[in-house]
Image (cartoon, helix red, strand yellow):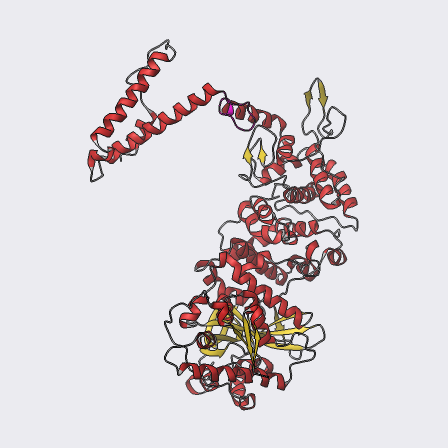
Amino acid sequence: MAPWTAGLACGALIFEGHFFMSLDAFENESLPPLLRRPDEVPEPVPVTQLRGFRKTLLDNPMNSLDEDAANVVTGGAVSPALLRKLVEATGDTAEAGLLMAKPVVGGTLYAIPPHRRFTDLDVLPDFLNQRWVHKLHTAMDDKHANNAPIVYNTFTDEETGQPRALFVVRVADRQALADAITESMRQTYDAQGQKNDYTDSVLQHGIKEPLTLFLVRVKYDDGVEETYTVAGDGNSRLVSMWLARTGGNIDEAAAACVAAVIGPVDRSGPRRPADQRSARSKVTEMVARVRRGLAEKILTEATRREGHTLTFPAIVVVGAMGEDGSALPDLVAARDDLVANLHVHVTPWDEGAQNTQGMQRVYRHALREHLVDDDTYKVLLGEVGPAAMHKLLGLPPHRLWSAALHQQCALAGQADRMNRLIKQEFGMGKADRQRVSERIAPMALSAYRSSASIDQFVRALGNGGTITDTVWKRDWKLTHGADALKVLDDILERALRGEANAVAELTVLGGTAAILSGFITRDRGSKLAAARELRTAPLRHTPNALLAVLASTQGGRRMLHSIAYAHVAADPSIVPKQFHTVVREIDGVVVQDGAPVVDKAGAMVSIDYEWDLVYAASPVEAEASIAELKKKLDGKGGSGSTSETEDARQRRILENAIKAASKAAFTLAKMTQTHPRGRDVFGLTTSVDALRQQLNSITETLIKFGPVADVMPDPEGEDEYEDEYEDGDE
């Protein structure tokens, strides 16, 4: 059989086990102009010849890696000899060799200076990927209950108990790792409208700026462990290299990365020496192909794709030291701090990603300072689902309590200490309600990320959210219980008696449920309208201001309970109901605060729209606002008004046209004083004369057919646009 095996149906060719895109797949495409030829690189050094290089690295005083991790560092280097010179600690460089010191919060990271590494040898994309961490589904999400997020932690040596410069992650098996890699590469590719795709740049000149790599120990459920390098900074460039290698399809790029770096995903047991030799053998074959291709005057597509993705420059973090000289305890925080400045200030992440990543660090600090315990921390990160949350913390097994727990931890009794961490993390001089709500919103609603309206929910919770005076910096707790609906009933009963803890709890649970149900949006989230319609409101309220009003009345508390109850029940037959919030007379009947709102059939009225909840919260204020809105809408059409009559429509057109013409005339008059054309800015003389004739004609029409004024207007009166013109003349 010929060595070439055709896979033309998918536009690919496989030659002796190697993947290539067929020419047919690119017949309508062309590569970008070549700006720099790929470098010719040596073949990988056999693993048996790397022992001395590994020992040199392990002997460096600032090295914090174990032997397996050091194997990966030395095994992926294009030039182990250069690597040895960079890490050798002798003579004048006895303290740390030529390792680069990178100051971070709490200490210093030590990294091997830029050197070239083989892309296919133990280099994984960042499979947590901070660019889309705010979209990562958690185990708390009902629709993704089995998809607990992969979380990086600092690896601790079991023998010494000392932390290492090494991450540790736990996944079920290699398939789970492959799935995480694939999803991360897809999300990286799609992030920010695919603005992070550097495929063309890679094909033109390869990768110029070094990537920052960390070491990661992957632990599988069967007890097997494997060590890789993982991208810290430069993940988009690494993904782009695989896109350039395979032809631009992200799924093919991810498959190629998994096949080359992880190998067969159904393999059991640890990687054998034969597996490592096979991986290095494939790289050796690629080196030979690129070398042959570089001998040609005009480089082939295959040479460019493999040559510019065969190796890349990198710095590798191999040491982590605390300020007191001990091992750095939190490599995750150090890693985040190392790359945060670049991504926040130079190539900004989505605000949701920044806030999510920041709150994750806040929670880690809170854990170290004993503001939260280990079980609470697991729930906050979304590592467990509702049932496990109930088992760990005793809270009702529903994800609404996960959202409430985030708010309780950040806003309740220890809020001052949490606020200090939030200010410290986000560089804020003041942690007011608006700023705090913006930061906690993406994490607080992490259990609802599968919802199509999650962005709307986050905006509402981030616009003051549930932070009322009763909630903010008050010592309130969440009620425990196994039955969520019974717990809600108990909270309402206590809230109706005026218990502050219950009122705060109901505000958070009911307010969050109202946001998740679309009954509360951000201040400008809905249109002001006199009529009851979808996405309208009779009043402007920030979410926390509206909740403060609701939580202060018996009827408001009942509505919050009703909304939360319907949300938790998730039963189409159970819908939130309206209650009166003030004592007043309606149609000759005096209604009390807390009484249900009933229709003419005697049935309780449902809360269908945001408009309903806003009106019910403040009926007197809402009616005054509606009356004002109707005045403004009268004669102009629109929601909440009768149809506009033709004479009113024509008057409106005339008024708007005259205002626009007057403003344009005074603007042009101002321009005559500064514009090089002077008075010619008005156009040709004939055009100006024509405009004057039209204006005179309009004036004559108004005098002849308009109503007779009782008092003649003062010809010396001021015009609003004259004022604007004169004020702006400074």
Q: Is residue 279 above or below residue 425?
A: below
Q: Provide the major secondary structure of the magenta segment.
A: loop
Q: Which residues are magenta?
A: 633-645
Q: Quadrant of residue 260?
A: bottom right
Residue 636: within the magenta? yes
Residue 49 appears in the picture as rendered: yes
In the rendered view of the protein, which quadrant contains the C terminus? top left
How many marks are shown on the rendered structure? 0
Question: Percent x, y for residue 38?
Answer: 41, 77
Residue 60 shows in the view: no
Q: Is residue 228 left or right of residue 212?
A: right
- Please provide percent x and percent y for residue 605: 71, 31
At 32% from the left and 24% from the top, the residue drawn is 719
Residue in front for this viewpoint, 95 or 139 = 139
In the figure, is residue 1 to the left or right of 654? right
Residue 488: give x, y in percent of width and height. Answer: 75, 43
Q: Estimate the x, y position of residue 465 in percent, counting from the top left.
A: 59, 44
* Between 602 and 693, the one nearer to me in the picture: 693
Q: Nearer the viewer, residue 541 or 235?
A: 235
Image quarter (top left, top right, bottom left or bottom right) of the N terminus? bottom right
Q: Residue furthest front?
A: 1
Q: Is residue 37 above or below residue 104?
A: below
Q: Is 241 a magenta residue? A: no
Which quadrant of the view contains residue 725?
A: top left
